[in-house]
Amino acid sequence: MKVFVANPRGFCAGVERAITTVERVLADYGPPVYVRHEVVHNRLVVETLRGKGAVFVEDLADVPEGGRVVFSAHGVARTVNEEARVRGLAVFDATCPLVAKVHKEVLRWRRDGYECLLIGHAGHPEVDGILGQVSDGVYLVENEGDLATVPIKDPEHVAYVTQTTLSVEDTARLIKSLRARFPAACGPRKDDICYATQNRQDAVRTLACHCDVVVVVGSTHSSNANRLRELAESVGVAAYLVDGPADLRHEWFGEVEAVGVTAGASTPESAVQSVIGRLREWGARLVQEEEGPTETVVFSLPGPLKRGRPQQRT
Protein backbone atom coordinates (compact mmCIF):
# COMPACT_ATOMS: atom_id res chain seq x y z
CA MET A 1 0.00 0.00 0.00
CA LYS A 2 1.28 3.43 -0.98
CA VAL A 3 0.39 6.66 0.82
CA PHE A 4 0.29 9.97 -1.04
CA VAL A 5 0.18 13.09 1.13
CA ALA A 6 -1.47 16.25 -0.21
CA ASN A 7 0.21 19.61 -0.41
CA PRO A 8 -0.75 22.09 0.79
CA ARG A 9 -2.63 20.74 3.80
CA GLY A 10 -3.35 21.65 7.40
CA PHE A 11 -3.08 25.03 9.06
CA CYS A 12 -3.81 28.17 7.08
CA ALA A 13 -2.63 31.66 8.04
CA GLY A 14 -5.90 32.54 9.79
CA VAL A 15 -5.77 29.42 11.95
CA GLU A 16 -2.10 29.99 12.80
CA ARG A 17 -2.96 33.54 13.85
CA ALA A 18 -5.89 32.47 16.03
CA ILE A 19 -3.99 29.75 17.86
CA THR A 20 -0.96 31.99 18.36
CA THR A 21 -3.25 34.70 19.74
CA VAL A 22 -4.54 32.41 22.48
CA GLU A 23 -1.04 31.15 23.25
CA ARG A 24 0.36 34.69 23.44
CA VAL A 25 -2.39 35.93 25.75
CA LEU A 26 -1.79 32.93 28.01
CA ALA A 27 1.95 33.59 28.01
CA ASP A 28 1.64 37.34 28.59
CA TYR A 29 -1.14 37.36 31.18
CA GLY A 30 -1.41 33.81 32.48
CA PRO A 31 -4.52 31.65 32.74
CA PRO A 32 -7.40 31.67 32.66
CA VAL A 33 -7.97 33.11 29.22
CA TYR A 34 -11.54 32.83 27.95
CA VAL A 35 -12.18 31.94 24.31
CA ARG A 36 -15.61 32.55 22.82
CA HIS A 37 -16.44 29.43 20.83
CA GLU A 38 -13.74 26.98 19.73
CA VAL A 39 -10.91 29.17 18.48
CA VAL A 40 -10.72 26.86 15.43
CA HIS A 41 -12.76 23.74 14.71
CA ASN A 42 -10.34 21.03 15.74
CA ARG A 43 -10.65 18.83 18.81
CA LEU A 44 -6.91 18.32 19.30
CA VAL A 45 -6.19 22.05 19.11
CA VAL A 46 -8.96 22.86 21.59
CA GLU A 47 -7.86 20.17 24.04
CA THR A 48 -4.24 21.33 23.86
CA LEU A 49 -5.16 24.95 24.55
CA ARG A 50 -7.53 23.91 27.33
CA GLY A 51 -4.63 22.09 28.95
CA LYS A 52 -2.66 25.34 28.93
CA GLY A 53 -5.42 27.27 30.68
CA ALA A 54 -7.83 28.37 27.95
CA VAL A 55 -11.50 28.26 28.96
CA PHE A 56 -13.92 27.85 26.06
CA VAL A 57 -17.35 29.45 26.38
CA GLU A 58 -20.28 30.04 24.04
CA ASP A 59 -21.68 33.05 25.90
CA LEU A 60 -19.86 36.11 27.20
CA ALA A 61 -22.01 35.85 30.32
CA ASP A 62 -19.66 33.03 31.31
CA VAL A 63 -16.66 35.38 31.28
CA PRO A 64 -16.17 36.99 34.72
CA GLU A 65 -15.82 40.72 35.21
CA GLY A 66 -12.33 41.85 34.27
CA GLY A 67 -11.76 38.67 32.26
CA ARG A 68 -9.68 38.41 29.12
CA VAL A 69 -11.48 36.96 26.13
CA VAL A 70 -10.35 35.89 22.66
CA PHE A 71 -12.84 35.95 19.80
CA SER A 72 -12.45 32.88 17.58
CA ALA A 73 -11.22 32.87 13.98
CA HIS A 74 -14.85 32.61 12.81
CA GLY A 75 -15.73 36.16 13.87
CA VAL A 76 -18.63 37.46 15.94
CA ALA A 77 -21.78 39.53 15.53
CA ARG A 78 -21.69 43.22 16.38
CA THR A 79 -23.92 42.53 19.40
CA VAL A 80 -21.14 40.39 20.88
CA ASN A 81 -18.67 43.23 20.46
CA GLU A 82 -21.14 45.58 22.08
CA GLU A 83 -21.69 43.26 25.03
CA ALA A 84 -17.93 43.03 25.57
CA ARG A 85 -17.67 46.82 25.42
CA VAL A 86 -20.47 47.35 27.93
CA ARG A 87 -18.93 44.86 30.35
CA GLY A 88 -15.44 46.29 29.96
CA LEU A 89 -13.86 42.97 29.01
CA ALA A 90 -10.31 42.86 27.67
CA VAL A 91 -10.77 41.57 24.13
CA PHE A 92 -8.27 40.02 21.72
CA ASP A 93 -10.02 39.62 18.38
CA ALA A 94 -8.65 36.60 16.48
CA THR A 95 -11.19 36.86 13.65
CA CYS A 96 -9.50 35.69 10.45
CA PRO A 97 -8.74 38.77 8.31
CA LEU A 98 -10.42 37.06 5.35
CA VAL A 99 -13.61 36.67 7.39
CA ALA A 100 -13.29 40.28 8.54
CA LYS A 101 -13.13 41.21 4.83
CA VAL A 102 -16.60 39.69 4.35
CA HIS A 103 -17.88 41.64 7.38
CA LYS A 104 -16.70 44.87 5.75
CA GLU A 105 -18.30 43.94 2.43
CA VAL A 106 -21.69 43.40 4.07
CA LEU A 107 -21.44 46.71 5.90
CA ARG A 108 -20.47 48.50 2.70
CA TRP A 109 -23.30 47.01 0.64
CA ARG A 110 -25.90 47.87 3.26
CA ARG A 111 -24.50 51.38 3.66
CA ASP A 112 -24.84 51.85 -0.11
CA GLY A 113 -28.47 50.72 -0.07
CA TYR A 114 -28.06 47.16 -1.35
CA GLU A 115 -29.72 44.06 0.02
CA CYS A 116 -27.19 41.28 0.44
CA LEU A 117 -27.31 37.53 -0.14
CA LEU A 118 -24.96 35.45 2.01
CA ILE A 119 -24.08 32.07 0.52
CA GLY A 120 -23.25 29.77 3.41
CA HIS A 121 -24.32 27.08 5.85
CA ALA A 122 -26.93 27.89 8.48
CA GLY A 123 -25.70 27.61 12.05
CA HIS A 124 -22.00 27.89 11.25
CA PRO A 125 -20.41 30.49 13.57
CA GLU A 126 -18.80 32.30 10.65
CA VAL A 127 -22.22 32.70 9.04
CA ASP A 128 -23.76 33.85 12.33
CA GLY A 129 -21.05 36.49 12.64
CA ILE A 130 -21.56 37.74 9.08
CA LEU A 131 -25.34 37.91 9.46
CA GLY A 132 -24.83 39.77 12.73
CA GLN A 133 -22.94 42.67 11.19
CA VAL A 134 -26.17 44.47 10.33
CA SER A 135 -29.71 44.45 11.69
CA ASP A 136 -31.52 43.67 8.43
CA GLY A 137 -31.28 43.29 4.68
CA VAL A 138 -28.95 40.24 4.63
CA TYR A 139 -30.42 36.86 3.63
CA LEU A 140 -28.83 33.44 3.97
CA VAL A 141 -28.81 31.33 0.80
CA GLU A 142 -27.82 27.68 1.13
CA ASN A 143 -29.20 26.32 -2.14
CA GLU A 144 -31.18 27.16 -5.26
CA GLY A 145 -34.43 26.66 -3.38
CA ASP A 146 -33.52 29.56 -1.13
CA LEU A 147 -32.90 31.73 -4.19
CA ALA A 148 -36.46 31.14 -5.32
CA THR A 149 -37.94 32.48 -2.09
CA VAL A 150 -35.51 35.16 -0.92
CA PRO A 151 -37.54 38.36 -0.21
CA ILE A 152 -35.52 40.86 -2.23
CA LYS A 153 -37.32 44.21 -2.52
CA ASP A 154 -35.25 45.78 -5.30
CA PRO A 155 -33.60 43.32 -7.76
CA GLU A 156 -31.53 46.18 -9.19
CA HIS A 157 -29.75 46.67 -5.86
CA VAL A 158 -28.60 43.20 -4.83
CA ALA A 159 -25.14 42.08 -3.78
CA TYR A 160 -23.74 38.76 -2.59
CA VAL A 161 -20.96 37.51 -0.32
CA THR A 162 -19.96 33.99 0.70
CA GLN A 163 -18.72 32.03 3.67
CA THR A 164 -14.96 31.54 3.28
CA THR A 165 -14.84 27.73 3.64
CA LEU A 166 -17.35 26.52 1.06
CA SER A 167 -16.93 24.11 -1.83
CA VAL A 168 -15.50 26.16 -4.68
CA GLU A 169 -17.42 24.26 -7.36
CA ASP A 170 -20.75 24.20 -5.52
CA THR A 171 -20.49 27.90 -4.77
CA ALA A 172 -19.69 28.73 -8.40
CA ARG A 173 -22.83 26.89 -9.51
CA LEU A 174 -24.97 28.70 -6.96
CA ILE A 175 -23.54 32.08 -7.95
CA LYS A 176 -24.40 31.28 -11.58
CA SER A 177 -27.99 30.61 -10.55
CA LEU A 178 -28.01 33.74 -8.41
CA ARG A 179 -26.92 35.87 -11.33
CA ALA A 180 -29.55 34.26 -13.54
CA ARG A 181 -32.25 35.38 -11.12
CA PHE A 182 -30.64 38.73 -10.28
CA PRO A 183 -28.69 39.82 -13.40
CA ALA A 184 -27.70 43.13 -11.78
CA ALA A 185 -26.21 41.42 -8.69
CA CYS A 186 -22.86 42.75 -7.51
CA GLY A 187 -20.21 40.51 -5.98
CA PRO A 188 -16.99 40.94 -4.04
CA ARG A 189 -14.00 42.43 -5.83
CA LYS A 190 -12.10 39.27 -4.91
CA ASP A 191 -13.67 35.88 -4.17
CA ASP A 192 -14.61 35.41 -0.54
CA ILE A 193 -13.65 31.72 -0.48
CA CYS A 194 -10.18 31.86 1.00
CA TYR A 195 -6.94 30.89 -0.73
CA ALA A 196 -6.36 27.99 1.69
CA THR A 197 -9.77 26.48 1.01
CA GLN A 198 -9.15 26.70 -2.75
CA ASN A 199 -5.65 25.21 -2.50
CA ARG A 200 -6.72 22.29 -0.29
CA GLN A 201 -9.65 21.47 -2.55
CA ASP A 202 -7.37 21.52 -5.61
CA ALA A 203 -4.95 19.21 -3.80
CA VAL A 204 -7.59 16.67 -2.79
CA ARG A 205 -8.95 16.63 -6.33
CA THR A 206 -5.46 15.66 -7.52
CA LEU A 207 -5.22 12.95 -4.85
CA ALA A 208 -8.54 11.47 -5.89
CA CYS A 209 -7.26 10.98 -9.43
CA HIS A 210 -4.71 8.34 -8.42
CA CYS A 211 -5.83 7.06 -5.01
CA ASP A 212 -8.37 4.38 -4.12
CA VAL A 213 -9.21 5.94 -0.74
CA VAL A 214 -8.77 9.46 0.64
CA VAL A 215 -8.40 10.10 4.37
CA VAL A 216 -9.13 13.65 5.48
CA VAL A 217 -7.71 14.47 8.90
CA GLY A 218 -9.99 16.94 10.66
CA SER A 219 -12.87 17.25 13.07
CA THR A 220 -16.45 16.50 12.06
CA HIS A 221 -17.60 20.07 12.78
CA SER A 222 -14.93 21.63 10.55
CA SER A 223 -16.59 23.07 7.45
CA ASN A 224 -13.47 23.03 5.29
CA ALA A 225 -12.56 19.46 6.29
CA ASN A 226 -16.05 18.24 5.42
CA ARG A 227 -15.82 19.91 2.04
CA LEU A 228 -12.60 17.99 1.32
CA ARG A 229 -14.27 14.67 2.12
CA GLU A 230 -17.29 15.57 -0.02
CA LEU A 231 -15.07 16.61 -2.92
CA ALA A 232 -13.21 13.30 -2.94
CA GLU A 233 -16.52 11.41 -2.79
CA SER A 234 -17.95 13.49 -5.63
CA VAL A 235 -15.35 12.08 -8.04
CA GLY A 236 -16.11 8.50 -7.02
CA VAL A 237 -13.44 7.82 -4.40
CA ALA A 238 -14.17 6.48 -0.94
CA ALA A 239 -13.31 9.18 1.57
CA TYR A 240 -13.26 9.28 5.37
CA LEU A 241 -12.98 12.12 7.87
CA VAL A 242 -10.96 11.26 10.99
CA ASP A 243 -9.73 13.19 14.00
CA GLY A 244 -6.73 10.91 14.35
CA PRO A 245 -5.43 7.34 14.05
CA ALA A 246 -7.97 5.97 16.54
CA ASP A 247 -10.73 6.64 13.98
CA LEU A 248 -9.10 4.61 11.21
CA ARG A 249 -10.64 1.22 10.34
CA HIS A 250 -8.75 -1.76 8.85
CA GLU A 251 -11.62 -2.61 6.54
CA TRP A 252 -11.24 0.68 4.66
CA PHE A 253 -7.90 -0.47 3.25
CA GLY A 254 -8.39 -4.20 2.56
CA GLU A 255 -7.63 -4.30 -1.18
CA VAL A 256 -6.37 -0.73 -1.50
CA GLU A 257 -3.14 0.00 -3.37
CA ALA A 258 -3.00 3.81 -2.94
CA VAL A 259 -4.26 5.95 -0.07
CA GLY A 260 -4.38 9.74 -0.16
CA VAL A 261 -4.03 11.72 3.06
CA THR A 262 -4.90 15.37 3.46
CA ALA A 263 -6.00 17.69 6.27
CA GLY A 264 -8.40 20.55 6.79
CA ALA A 265 -7.14 24.07 7.41
CA SER A 266 -7.66 23.76 11.18
CA THR A 267 -5.80 20.45 11.55
CA PRO A 268 -2.31 20.35 13.13
CA GLU A 269 0.44 18.51 11.28
CA SER A 270 0.97 16.28 14.32
CA ALA A 271 -2.45 14.72 13.69
CA VAL A 272 -1.55 14.07 10.04
CA GLN A 273 1.70 12.38 11.01
CA SER A 274 -0.07 10.24 13.60
CA VAL A 275 -2.46 8.99 10.91
CA ILE A 276 0.42 8.28 8.54
CA GLY A 277 2.20 6.45 11.36
CA ARG A 278 -0.77 4.15 11.84
CA LEU A 279 -0.93 3.44 8.10
CA ARG A 280 2.75 2.49 8.23
CA GLU A 281 1.99 0.08 11.06
CA TRP A 282 -0.69 -1.45 8.85
CA GLY A 283 1.72 -2.06 5.99
CA ALA A 284 2.15 1.19 4.04
CA ARG A 285 5.55 0.77 2.37
CA LEU A 286 5.89 4.12 0.66
CA VAL A 287 4.86 7.58 1.81
CA GLN A 288 5.19 10.23 -0.88
CA GLU A 289 4.60 13.98 -0.58
CA GLU A 290 2.61 15.45 -3.45
CA GLU A 291 3.72 18.62 -5.18
CA GLY A 292 1.68 21.77 -4.63
CA PRO A 293 1.84 25.54 -4.33
CA THR A 294 3.85 27.05 -1.50
CA GLU A 295 1.68 29.19 0.78
CA THR A 296 3.43 32.31 2.01
CA VAL A 297 0.48 34.23 3.51
CA VAL A 298 1.09 35.43 7.07
CA PHE A 299 -1.34 37.51 9.14
CA SER A 300 -0.08 39.75 11.91
CA LEU A 301 -1.40 39.29 15.44
CA PRO A 302 -4.27 41.44 16.73
CA GLY A 303 -3.19 45.01 17.39
CA PRO A 304 -3.39 44.79 21.21
CA LEU A 305 -0.82 41.97 21.26
CA LYS A 306 1.51 43.88 18.96
CA ARG A 307 1.20 46.86 21.29
CA GLY A 308 1.55 44.68 24.34
CA ARG A 309 -1.85 45.46 25.85
CA PRO A 310 -5.42 44.20 25.38
CA GLN A 311 -8.18 46.08 23.66
CA GLN A 312 -10.21 47.42 26.57
CA ARG A 313 -13.87 47.80 25.68
CA THR A 314 -15.02 51.07 27.26
Image (cartoon, rainbow, N blue to C red):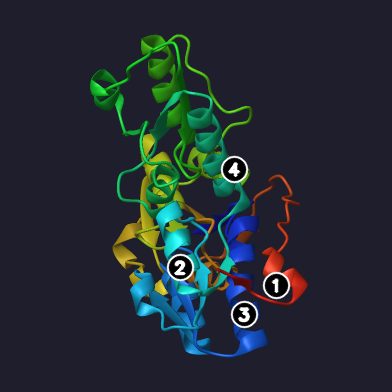
Q: Is residue 189 above or below residue 222?
A: above
Q: Nearer the viewer, residue 19 or 249?
A: 19
Badge 1 marks a residue whose secondary structure is helix
Q: Which residue is mark 4?
A: 101
* Residue 305 in which image quadrant: bottom right
Can see residue 283? no
Position of the C terminus by quadrant = bottom right
Name the amino acid, label 3.
Val
| Image-based side of 298 in relation to 130, left or right | right
Q: Which residue is mark 1?
A: 305
Name the amino acid, label 2.
Val
**Mark 1–mark 3 CB contact (< 8 Å):** yes
Badge 1: how crowded within 10 Å, few (<14), some, or many (20+)?
A: some
What is the CA distance from the residue labelled 3 to the residue labelled 2? 21 Å
Badge 4 marks a residue whose secondary structure is helix
Q: Nearer the viewer, residue 288 or 95?
A: 95
x 34%, y 74%: residue: 61
Q: Which residue is mark 2?
A: 86
Q: Which residue is mark 3?
A: 25
**Mark 3–mark 4 CB contact (< 8 Å):** no
Mark closest to the chain's N terminus, 1 or 3: 3
Name the amino acid, label 4.
Lys
**Mark 4–mark 1 CB contact (< 8 Å):** no
